[in-house]
């Protein structure tokens, strides 16, 4: 077990904007309770603290000084924190974004468990899913992590689309030869594709709707939505109606928490138990 900086307990935080109702803190704390570990997970909301995103380095420095063992980092500071870390894991360096920071022996190391969490979610949630041609809708922070994960899993052709064409083009260029940018609204976007991975905020609480016309979804397509509030998005409901294999965003949310918990504590959490906890919180 990693030695906690706080006696026999761990102090962990979540930095982001509008994260007051995040399900990640209770997921970590309940798993720590089950393992008999003292664990305090605090929300450090940029909006509530009046800290503008570009000043995130001050908050990271304060957490390090105050004896935090680790942090989760989310929108809009996953890239902005890079300048305030001592080291990056290979995965975080490849993506150019961090969602987890560990403080060990005074060294701040950035990790990206969105990549590892998504990979494990896809391989366990849709076992055997064909990965020749996959469409990634959304080239923001999460989309970048998913693009790297999908290529690592063996996708041969990755089509990247985004409302903002420059984002799709930028991500496709960073991902290399197997990725291409597709125009937003292209009716042929899903032609011949095995799967669709959705990584835009469309369908989450406060952003209702479908990110693309339901008629484009054919029965032989698998569909993953990483939005998890709600778990059953309009996209997943439409895909299910049309006979597609589907996977909701809960599994990725849990596996990224599993990986972060292990990095910070050095203890292996029980992933099934964390799924169970997550389901009970997310479904109320
Ligand atoms: P972001 O703001 O960084 O990126 C979103 C991207 O989607 C932007 O590039 C935007 O231009 C694009 N976009 C918005 N609407 C679109 C549309 N209709 N069609 C095409 N492109 C569109 O956001 P993010 O951090 O990448 O997060 C995206 C979503 O993923 C959020 O809902 C977030 O909650 C979810 N998420 C889930 C997990 C998980 O563990 N399940 C992890 C990270 C993010």
Image (tube, helix red, strand yellow):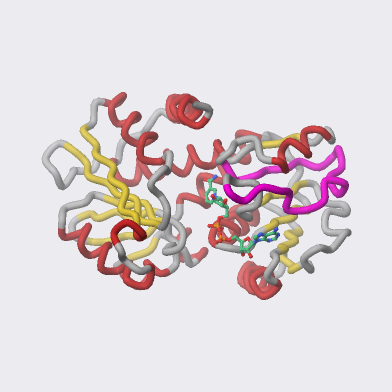
**Quadrant in which the N terminus is drawn:** top left
Tell me the residue at 23%/43% (across/down).
Answer: 2
Q: Position of residue 137 (x, y in %)?
A: 70, 57
Q: How many marks?
A: 0
Q: Position of residue 151 (x, y in %)?
A: 65, 56
Query: In the displayed structure, does residue 181 sit left or right of residue 71?
Result: right
Tell me the residue at 74%/55% (across/down).
Answer: 135
Residue 224 appears in the figure = yes
Q: Position of residue 117 (x, y in %)?
A: 51, 44
Quadrant location of residue 17?
bottom left
Tell me the residue at 40%/59% (across/down).
Answer: 89
Name the residue nearer the viewer: 265 or 218: 218
Q: Which residues are magenta?
A: 206-228
Residue 127 to residue 166: above or below: above
Name the residue nearer the viewer: 131 or 215: 215
Query: In the displayed structure, does residue 165 sit left or right of residue 58?
Result: right
Query: In the displayed structure, does residue 273 sit left or right of residue 10?
Result: right
Q: Residue furthest left?
A: 7
Name the residue nearer the viewer: 46 or 153: 46
Q: Position of residue 228 (x, y in %)?
A: 57, 41
Residue 6 to residue 185: above or below: above
Quadrant location of residue 233?
top right
Q: Is residue 167 magenta?
A: no
Residue 152 appears in the figure = no
Name the residue nearer the viewer: 97 or 116: 97
Q: Main secondary structure of the magenta part?
A: loop
Q: Is residue 214 magenta?
A: yes
Q: Ligand 1 shows up in which quadrant of the image?
A: bottom right
Tell me the residue at 58%/49% (across/down).
Answer: 206
């Amino acid at each position: 077990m990693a030695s906690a900086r706080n006696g026999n307990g761990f102090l962990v935080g979540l930095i982001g904007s509008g994260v007051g109702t995040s399900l990640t803190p209770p997921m970590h704390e309940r798993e720590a309770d089950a393992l008999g570990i003292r664990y305090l997970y605090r929300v450090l909301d940029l909006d509530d603290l009046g800290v503008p995103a570009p000043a995130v380095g001050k908050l990271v420095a304060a957490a390090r000084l105050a004896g935090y063992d680790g942090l989760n980092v989310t929108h809009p500071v996953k890239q902005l924190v890079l300048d305030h870390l001592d080291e990056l894991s290979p995965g975080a360096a490849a993506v150019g974004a961090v969602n987890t920071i560990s403080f060990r022996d005074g060294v701040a190391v950035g990790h990206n468990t969105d990549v590892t969490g998504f990979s494990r979610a896809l391989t366990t949630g849709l076992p055997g899913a064909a990965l020749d041609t996959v469409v990634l809708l959304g080239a923001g922070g999460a989309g970048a992590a998913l693009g790297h994960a999908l290529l690592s899993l063996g996708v041969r052709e990755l089509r990247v689309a985004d409302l903002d064409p420059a984002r799709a083009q930028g991500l496709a260029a960073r991902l290399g030869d197997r990725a291409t940018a597709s125009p937003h609204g292209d009716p042929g976007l899903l032609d011949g594709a095995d799967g669709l991975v959705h990584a835009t905020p469309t369908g989450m609480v406060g952003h209702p709707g479908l990110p693309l016309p339901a008629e484009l979804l054919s029965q032989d397509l698998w569909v993953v939505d990483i939005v998890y509030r709600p778990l059953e998005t309009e996209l997943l409901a439409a895909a299910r109606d049309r006979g597609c294999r589907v996977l909701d965003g809960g599994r990725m949310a849990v596996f990224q928490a599993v990986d972060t918990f292990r990095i910070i504590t050095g203890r292996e959490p029980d992933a099934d138990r964390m799924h169970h906890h997550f389901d009970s919180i997310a479904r109320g």
